[in-house]
Image: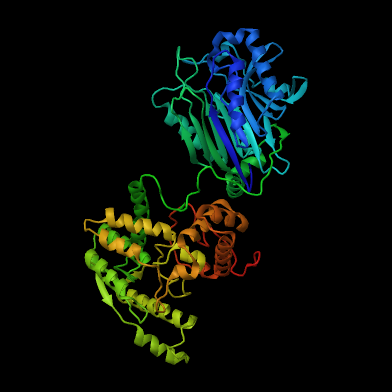
Amino acid sequence: MAGLGFMKVQAVAPEVFVGNPTRNMHVMRDFLAKSEADMVVFPELSVTGYTASDLFFQGQLLTDAHDAIKSLLRDNPFQGLIVLGAPFDYQGLMYNAAWVIQGKQVLGIIPKLYVPNTQEYYEKRWFTSGLKIIEDVREVTFNGQKIPFGSLLFETEDTTVSFGVEVCEDMWAPYTPGNLLALKGAKMIVNISASNETFGKRDVRKRTIIEHSRKNMGAYIYASAGPSESTSETVFSGHLVAASTGELLLETEDFNPKTTAITADIDLESIRFKRQHYSSFRDLKVSLTYPVQRVKIHVEPALSYSFERPLDRTPLVPKEDQKAAFKQLSSLLESALYKRMHHIGAKTIVLGLSGGLDSTLALMIAARVADKLGIERMRVMAVMMPAKANSKRTKMQAEALATRLGVTQKVIPIDAAVADHFTLIDHDGKTLDTTYENAHARMRTLILMNLANLHKGIVLGTGDMSELALGFATYNGDQMSMYGINQGIPKTLVRFLVNAYGMHGFEEDLTAITQAIIETPISPELIPNQESEAMIGSYEINDFILARYLRHGDSESRIAFLIETTFHLDKAAAKTYVTRFFKRFFSQQFKRQASPDAPKVIDIALSPRTDFRLPSDISYGDH
């Protein structure tokens, strides 16, 4: 059931017996009796069969269709919302209509506006366009009930759930009813369809659905007739699609003559959040004058929610065609650094190389940019600045990577310089406090900055987005650089890119080195035996929180529930993760305010100059 801003919706292609509404309703009722969704969507003219042709002229077919719907109202095994297709007669004119039903009530009837009459479609032979009637008729009578008719927006009292319905060809029009209903508040558009199959049509249809969901900044549920329709002239495939805000959620098209279905988890709260950020949507919403009737519905709320399939544990990492994704990401990053180097005429790229993930990625990007600039890789200076806390493992990894890439290696031990600094500030040099850690980080930054001046270069930052989010960086230490190449990349994506660069980025075989680096526990190595994830928790979970907060606007309680569900943690552990993340996230904004230039890489970013603007002294919640 619906809960925590999620809603479970099923799109169904039922087995159809053309011209036999009684049998068709039996099939639909059997499905409904087993459904645990909040809404079930059946195709266009699913009560009669879309391919009934001239049977639509016969009064008996209309009578049988309406009798079938009445039988469902008398004995409806499903308490959720039902959308199905059946003809409707108004003053002697036949309309191809969508019917919205709940319990024993028809909540609304929506006529198809755009009736095709081209190529294989000749619907105007039987049906009348609804474009004119919706201007004049707002209510009809069926089964003794007065029923809203026309352009309808169904919504709960608190508008958490809101949807509109369009019928097949309506989706293909230049100016669709779904677009208009979305602008009036519908978070979800349902399309009941009978779209026949021809070679290549599936991809066009899918792209159209996804694009509507993007433009509407909402969900789009599409249910089309299946292959049990007549094949006298055309074939139907049972194409079922669910998309949301420009992303495909689920799809099937298996030409199965039996009943098939998909079940999608629709994130209504995410849609609300994204619409608040979509200024073009807001501008049109307030200027649009389009009459709709608002029909109140009830969706039983739940305190929890069970997902059909687990949420993606690493939502910021590409899943499909990873080689192509790497090519696009690497091109973006390398183009950014190339432009900066070319613009300022820098001769050298200087970076601190620790042997860990972030500096590895920065070095590989720098090496590729040197190649593109037509300069020797020796103009890339990898500076290793060991201190007492540095491990032999990371030192060996740094040296091996720099050697393989053919960049300049410079080793500058910093223990003596830090000891002198401790003397200057009256620190005993033994107490492993924040000052001890930050002195090492700032000494390294001081050295890098002055080396860059000396060699007419820039300091390439290595800190990533996850560290920026958590404030896990030393202010005016590793937080600072002359260009923050990794600042738009969360840690989970850093891992992906290091692995991809190792496999595809260079002629040199780097896979053994990069794999060793990926497997090394993440550490700033500022004090002995220091491990980042022991202090701030799993980066995978922190990146999940970051994605849910910035992409979907989730509350802390909602994120805690999603962590508990996705990572199989108990409530206490999930709450600890969320509390720790947001305490750091809000208190460390001052570091982000002073962050250097950095390219935006994915759809979210933390730059105070673009995506995320927040005062440093904000007091939000308990933080």
The colour scheme of the drawn protein is rainbow
Q: Quadrant of the C terminus?
A: bottom right
Q: Position of residue 424 (x, y in %)?
A: 44, 91
| Callout count | 0
The residue lying at 33 percent from left, 74 percent from top is 452
Q: Position of residue 282 (x, y in %)?
A: 62, 44
Asked if residue 51 can be seen in this view, the reply is yes
Asked if residue 212 can be seen in this view, the reply is no
Quarter of the image where one finds residue 336? bottom left
Above or below for 355 versus 434: above
Quarter of the image where one finds residue 171? top right
Above or below for 538 versus 425: above
Above or below for 155 versus 617: above
Front-lying residue, 81 or 428:
81
Q: Quadrant of the N terminus?
A: top right
Relative horizontal placement of residue 189, taking residue 232 as reference (left or right): right
Q: Position of residue 541 (x, y in %)?
A: 49, 59
Q: Position of residue 525 (x, y in %)?
A: 39, 75
Quarter of the image where one finds residue 365? bottom left
